[in-house]
Image: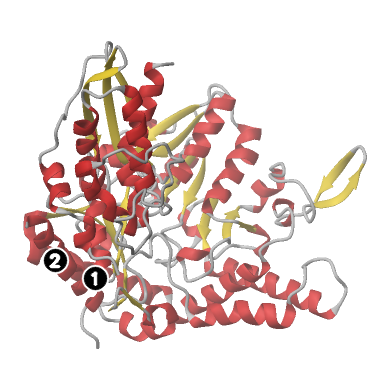
Amino acid sequence: MSADGDQLGPQTKAHFPLLTRQVHGKPIVYLDSAASSQKPRCVLDAMNSYYETINANVHRGAYEIAAQATEAMEAARAGVARFVNAPSADEIVFTKNVTEAINLVARSWGGANLGPGDAVVITEMEHHANIVPWHIMAAEKGFELRWIGVGADGQLDLSNLDRLFDGAKLLGVTAMSNVLGTLNPIRRLADAAHDAGALVLVDAAQYVPHLPTDVQALGADFLGFTGHKMCGPTGIGVLWARAELLEAMPPFLGGGEMILDVRKDGFLPNHIPHKFEAGTPPIAEIVGLGAAVEYLDDLGMDRVREHEVSLTAYALRTLEERYGPDLAVHGPSEPACRGGVLSMSFQDIHPHDLSQVLDDRGVCVRAGHHCAKPLMRHLGVPATTRASLYVYNDTSDVDALADALGAAGEFFAR
Amino acid sequence: MAGLEDLYREIILDHYRNPRNRGELEVPPAVQAVGFNPLCGDEVIVYVDVQDGVITDVSTGGQGCSISQSSASMMSIAIKGRKVSEVRRLVRAFKHMMSIHGTGIGGTGDDLDDDGDTGNGAGDVKLGDLEALRGVVKFPVRIKCATLSWNTLVQALDETFA
């Protein structure tokens, strides 16, 4: 049995070629997986192999490699569906990222279903990707945008849950905050929203990469996630939605692939999911995402979660022991209630200055508002320094972070 | 490789810890402009009071990193009491220094305007203490921190003469 916090990281690190490099002459300590994860060799190989052996456009040619490319893409779709326990692969719509997935729902479903007198409920801890599309649509359609605030210990304030969804048509909520790490009670919220006749859109960008995901058990109607935060490539995301919703929604983007027939007087949309996949898709990226979910499946998402809880506990303990009140970690204090996202305020050092000193020591963290400015205003800080953990991190990375924080403190105290 | 000492010169940290001309001015007669750095969330507010083509008073507010705040502080000293036409030339000279074209990355940085290029209209402008920010160019992601207050100043001046 490995030490606490080292259940997975020391073994998996070797799967990720980038983690062997140095920055500024020091071994890289990558702690920014909440922004984008690194990619294991098997994902890179799958994408290369696609280009080297079966590259062709999909759903078109009758020749051998075109059929193989189509098979590879649809096999990835089936793998992604299994990974989140979707009832059918037809419910998996490939998008560019979560941002596009949410914009698809806002434009297509929202455009057809929202108007004056309606409300869309979102939370103060949403990423801008689950705020701005609703601002845009609210200005166009005249519905109310209603906010769930953040209360104590980085949890949503659900004190008025019984009236929260009055007149609401949709709840948009993050399953895990990219700033606080808070794991929101999605099932409880979904049940309350459904009781009031509202649908539920879950931003699972930070959830699917880190916890076993069952879209049916969560009670979601729409759920978005993205490949590049879960060992896959950039440029490929997923919108999962219940089939009957997708069937009823008007198309989002128009073009090739998304039609059954086009005439001078109109068009007939394709069946789902192709109805929402206009144009040539990012085929290699889809293949890469398919390899990524296989990789995570092989590790086992239960083990991934166990590892991250343990490493988060180690990190919280280490930082508390070394820096006490000089360092605040925003969000839930209990590791079991949160993901491995540590948004820190350290002494009075501005996050941008802090991350500069950390970078000098090879430690990669994110400084800034994390695309969550309403939450920053609630926390009363302009920005935070965020370290985030994933399958390849271990206690040595946390120790390097703690040492680098100490060096930053000394540097700015001079 | 550029070291942290190139970036965090003592004079920069001094202006960060003890910012000059910090606060607000009454609007009007002063004009206010707000600048944002969407990358990191930094925010700079610049107040300028212009009388007869001269910046008679200046104040800055907002929140941000040592580079953005010290740059605002040093800027306020450099422009107070100066003619707007001179200040616009100073802005051009400063932004020239803050461009990769103006200061070769990794170079000594001593060659500003030595190339006889006065096309930026800033060839004879003395930057004084602002020279301390030259090292920022070696850290390209921080250039926007250093130029934030200057871009905001231009907004305020443009509004004054709108």
* A309 left or right of A319 in image: right
Q: In the picture, which quadrant includes the C terminus of chain B?
A: top left
In which image quadrant can residue B82 be found?
A: top left
Mark 1 is on which residue type?
Arg
Q: What residue did someone put label 2 on?
A: A407
Q: Is residue B127 above or below residue B28?
A: below
Mark 2 is on which residue type?
Ala
In which image quadrant can residue B96 be found?
A: top left
Query: Same chain, marks 1 and 2?
Result: yes
Nearest to the observer: residue A135 or residue A272 = A135
In the image, what residue occupies the spot 35% across and 32% down? B152
**Circle 1 residues within 10 Å: few <14, some 14–19, many ≥20:** many
Count of marks, rendered view: 2
Is disc 1 in contact with disc 2, using a CB cutoff of under 8 Å?
Answer: yes
Secondary structure category for the residue under label 2: helix
| Mark 1 vs mark 2, CA separation in Å | 9 Å
- Percent x, y for residue B80? 21, 26
In the image, what residue occupies the spot 19% across and 61% down? B5
- Percent x, y for residue B76? 22, 31
Q: Which chain carries label 1?
A: A
Label ID, residue A361: 1
Secondary structure category for the residue under label 1: loop
**Circle 2 residues within 10 Å: few <14, some 14–19, many ≥20:** some
Q: Mark 2 lies on which chain?
A: A
Label ID, residue A323: none
* A365 left or right of A408 in image: right
Residue that sits furthest to the front in the current view:
B116
Nearest to the observer: residue B141 or residue A97 = B141
In the image, what residue occupies the spot 23% across and 54% down? A353
Report whether residue A373 is seen.
Answer: no
Q: Is residue A259 above or below residue A78?
A: above
